[in-house]
Amino acid sequence: MGAAAVAYGASRHARPARDPMTRITLVINRALRNVSATVLATALVTVGTTGTAGNAADTASAGRSSGPVSRPVVHLGVWKTSFIPKTPKRPITVQGRNKAFASRLITRREWPTTQFRCLDRLWTRESNWNHRATNHSSGAYGIPQALPGWKMSGVGRDWRTNPETQIRWGLKYIKIRYRTPCGAWGSFQSRGWY
């Protein structure tokens, strides 16, 4: 009875012995609780081939060198889903619409994309793609800063309010005077106007 009581008391206060599978399962469960950003789908545990249920590290420390000691290996995978989070769409600005229209016209003229980059730099400096931009000192108006602004009426009567009319006129002017937007940009860089 005394031996049973000691054994009972010892087992009650001491941690119960666990096999390697239980230890690994506890480690995996702890990792799953601690890592909230990663979803772990599989945990395949391969226990060493020592033939005993003991820990492989205990076998190595006991001095047994009968063969290579393999340690438990944990393979973790990532669960992939088809869920795609929705990102809020940014509203398209007036400048963005004007740039997209100009880009389409440049593509139709079969100019390379480098020409649009030059045009973007030029008209960003001139008017920031604002179709109502006015230079109060010179009287230049619109996206291409036509001087005087009424010259754009040759392309459309709505030249004061329609950015597409202004862009069409500006590209026509650039083609006649400078051949390409990069030619106009180079002239602007050297003289400060085009």
Image: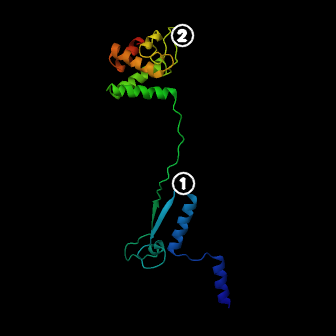
Is residue 72 visible in the rendered image? The answer is no
Secondary structure at numbered mark 2: loop
**Residue 88 position in % (x across, y down):** 54, 41
Residue named by callout 2 = 136
* The label number, if any, that marks residue 57 in the structure image: none
**Residue 69 position in % (x across, y down):** 40, 72
Q: How far apart are marks 1 and 2 (CA)?
A: 56 Å
Residue 110: quadrant of the picture? top left
Crowding at label 1, few (<14), some or many (≥20) Cα neighbours within 10 Å?
few
Q: Which residue is drawn at 40% across and 27% down?
A: 103
Q: In this view, does 22 lie to the left or right of 181?
A: right
Q: Which residue is drawn at 42% across and 79% down?
A: 51
156 or 66: nearer the eye? 156
Secondary structure at numbered mark 1: loop
**Amino acid marked by disc 2:** His
Residue named by callout 1 = 37
Crowding at label 2, few (<14), some or many (≥20) Cα neighbours within 10 Å?
few
For residue 7, above or below residue 118: below
